[in-house]
Image: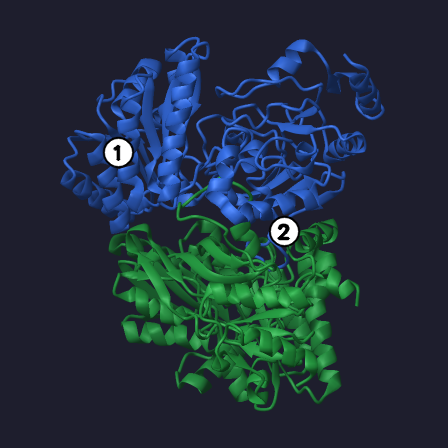
Chain colours: A blue, B green
Amino acid sequence: MNTDTAILQEELLQFLREDQVSTNETILTNHSKDESYHEGSLPDLVVFPESAEEISKIIKVADASGTPVIPFGLGSSLEGHVIAYDKGITIDFSSMNKVTEVRDKDFLVKVQPGVTRSQLNKALKKHGLFFSVDPGADATLGGMAATNASGTTSVKYGVMKDQVQDLEVVLPNGEIIHTGSLARKSSSGYDLTSLYVGSEGTLGCITELTLRVYGIPEHVMAARASFPTIDHAVEAVISMLQAGVPVARVELLDESSIRRVNQFNGTDYIEKATLFLEFHGNEAGLQEDVAFMEEIVKNHDCEVIHFEKDNAARMKLWEARHNLAYAYIHGSPGKKMMVTDVCVPISELAGAIRHGREKIAELNLESGILGHVGDGNYHALLMIDMENEEELKKAEKFNEEIVEYALARGGTCTGEHGVGKGKMKYQKREHGKALPVMEAIKASIDPKGIMNPGKLVQSERRNNQ
Amino acid sequence: MNTDTAILQEELLQFLREDQVSTNETILTNHSKDESYHEGSLPDLVVFPESAEEISKIIKVADASGTPVIPFGLGSSLEGHVIAYDKGITIDFSSMNKVTEVRDKDFLVKVQPGVTRSQLNKALKKHGLFFSVDPGADATLGGMAATNASGTTSVKYGVMKDQVQDLEVVLPNGEIIHTGSLARKSSSGYDLTSLYVGSEGTLGCITELTLRVYGIPEHVMAARASFPTIDHAVEAVISMLQAGVPVARVELLDESSIRRVNQFNGTDYIEKATLFLEFHGNEAGLQEDVAFMEEIVKNHDCEVIHFEKDNAARMKLWEARHNLAYAYIHGSPGKKMMVTDVCVPISELAGAIRHGREKIAELNLESGILGHVGDGNYHALLMIDMENEEELKKAEKFNEEIVEYALARGGTCTGEHGVGKGKMKYQKREHGKALPVMEAIKASIDPKGIMNPGKLVQSERRNNQ
């Protein structure tokens, strides 16, 4: 431990207990990386605060010494968001994992940032409520807000940004603010809530979230629809959206992904390009929606529609979808995962996936294509041997090619995973003259650039290095 | 015309035609005020640009001389947003009123800022699409984005912020940026779109909007439900929301408002506290939803439910609702209108309206209570004799009291009308330490404070005066 770290530690121990401040090698290593192929880097210290007030004090210490601060949920991010590239203090939220208030009449819930999505849903169930956003990982809600995460239900319920009503945030100067209110809508002041959602810890540290929740739907119907090719499946989704069929979930899995699902979960789903579908509503309305969907998928040569009638089979279906990245990781031991994440306008989706498939075929890598196709967002999943520099290079080139394709058609380089370190190189291409506006906002709120440096936007701190 | 104005005019005429630059007294007067009780103030000049490039040049001229720039749609705002308190150049968008692209497959439309909501819906109809946000006024979409407007449908479709996918904005330095993309979701960069929606022209000038649109619903059912008291009506709405009845519209009108509606529109609606309701969906689902609604309103002593079966009667119902403010203005010649606009969590709505009614009864002014009750947003409408200082004072005191009541219960001082000049005094109370963050953002994007000064946040320019 160097002198600066020892001084920092001493300052932190003025108000934190010994077990709340760690320089233990294993702890540092566990906080040095995320779930992606991005190379890790150790922080100087990991702290385990228990309140916004403690985080305020930690950030004041960091501010005084110009030390980087990296908020860390569960490390399930995919673009290096939590990696301590410039060292510094990593804030672990595992001791801030309480659902603090369920306001069932307002369809709102208050949670600490370390609560995971499945933990929240467990707490909500007895109130007849659920939280909609479901990325693959059982991520923390703080992390999900920080990256504007989404998942299988966003086609109906929206993304993280649509669910966050208020945030308590510790600013880079240690002040504690609220970005919103409990009112469902507001035209008062600039929308700081939406600014902080997706800001990836670069403008402050989220210490409490007020989230919108929904009544558990009266009736739910899930189905798997298998198609002769992935093209047929994508075209079926586009037709459904055009026709206004109100799907709650519509997920695409290619043949390779279904094979991984079967291997990992012991299921026997037909190994062809498949849509996982779900509908929510009242009984009569649902029947009409499902009949309409059946008609459309059949028009697109759907070969089999299998309805998941009982609750257990339905749960299994979505668990299999959520675990898909882990199924790939499990099936390719020793390799690291790169997941692309472009999102395009729906009218460009079929072309984008066709382009992606052509390019992926040239790579000769373990790979799959899957996506939240109702949003125009698809992922190519590539398994890389990190010892093999050529593999990494060609995977990166592929990622660039599909980003370029998406941006040329009005799309975005990241639909839901965020910028982190990995997508910074595309920010100028995507945002053009809007990027200096983002940098100006960063500089105005975090003038020393201590908050999660090296992610999302350049800051003064790193410019001066 | 003073020398400075003459110089400005000369500079503007370098790239604008004579008919695009006006110092005509009548034109200046028409651009000096909005639809509210706020006192007007004349700009130096009104310009009528036809493109983003022209607006960029106008703003560069303003930037060079530190001249205020005030974007002006139709002047239907209610908190003094378009009043030229510091003089300067008012930008009128009436020559930028084209629907530039309908991307029906993407459920997106591109419009210039001067397009009105009814003009847009007329253009969308032949595509089977509609735009959801419907404030009372037939406002321009640029103005609606600038104030984060909403209306009768936001309980189902959301507010303006939920519809804006991308904005073209001219920055205070004249640069032209895009804040978003055509992709339905994105986690790339800070969310400048949400920052600009609701920023009331204080961070730049919107020159094009890309908006989300919806398929015209397969089936629509509208109804009027009359209750013995306003309390009964509010409690019925709360029960409907709790039970998850998927209303598309639910508007409250008190007895006085129904009376005004009948006078202004020649209708014969029952003059009691009433809910205007609408449901959208497929035929079978709709019947089930409406039956559920009927059951709930009857449990709350609903006296009559009248279904508006044909399209014409349904259109008349919503037209009557939209014209309600004009009905009051028409019915009180010579008086000015103050509209309050608090929004509270649904669990606090019944109490808030009860408090508002008690306070309003003490005023002895022409008044009514109405609201987008599904969002927890209600308006008290007061007609004021501006010659009578006491009337204005007591109306302002009432406004303060209900804002205070809302803020103490987690609400907001404005649900949809915006801050403008009128609600600036509540910003510190509502946002606390978040207000300096807003001011820092303002200063970083508009360092000279030329964009719509004196609205929403304080800027350097005015601090130095």
Query: Mark 2 or mark 1, which is nearer to you?
Result: 1
- Residue type, numbered disc 1: Arg
The residue lying at 49 percent from left, 21 percent from top is A36
Q: Can you say whether A182 is above or below B223 in the image?
A: above
Query: Which quadrant of the structure image shows residue A6?
Result: top right
In the picture of the structure, the residue carrying the numbered disc 1 is A354
Q: How far across and how far down the image is residue A116, in percent? A: 55, 29
Q: Quadrant of the N terminus of chain B?
A: bottom right
Q: CA distance from mark 2 to mark 1?
A: 44 Å
Q: Of label 2 and label 1, which has the lower sequence position?
A: 2
Position of the C terminus of chain B by quadrant: bottom right
Q: Locate residue A171, reporting x and y percent.
A: 71, 40
The circle on residue A201 is none
Residue pictured at 40% horizontal, 15% vertical: A390
Instruction: Check the residue under mark 1 and report the chain it is in.
Output: A
Q: What subunit carries mark 2?
A: A
Q: Quadrant of residue A62?
A: top right
Reading the image, the residue beneath label 2 is A181
Residue B235 at least partly seen: yes
Q: For the image shown, how many numbered marks are present on the structure?
A: 2
Type of amino acid at the residue the image marks with label 2:
Ser
Residue B232 in sight here: no
State whether residue A54 is above or below residue B418.
above
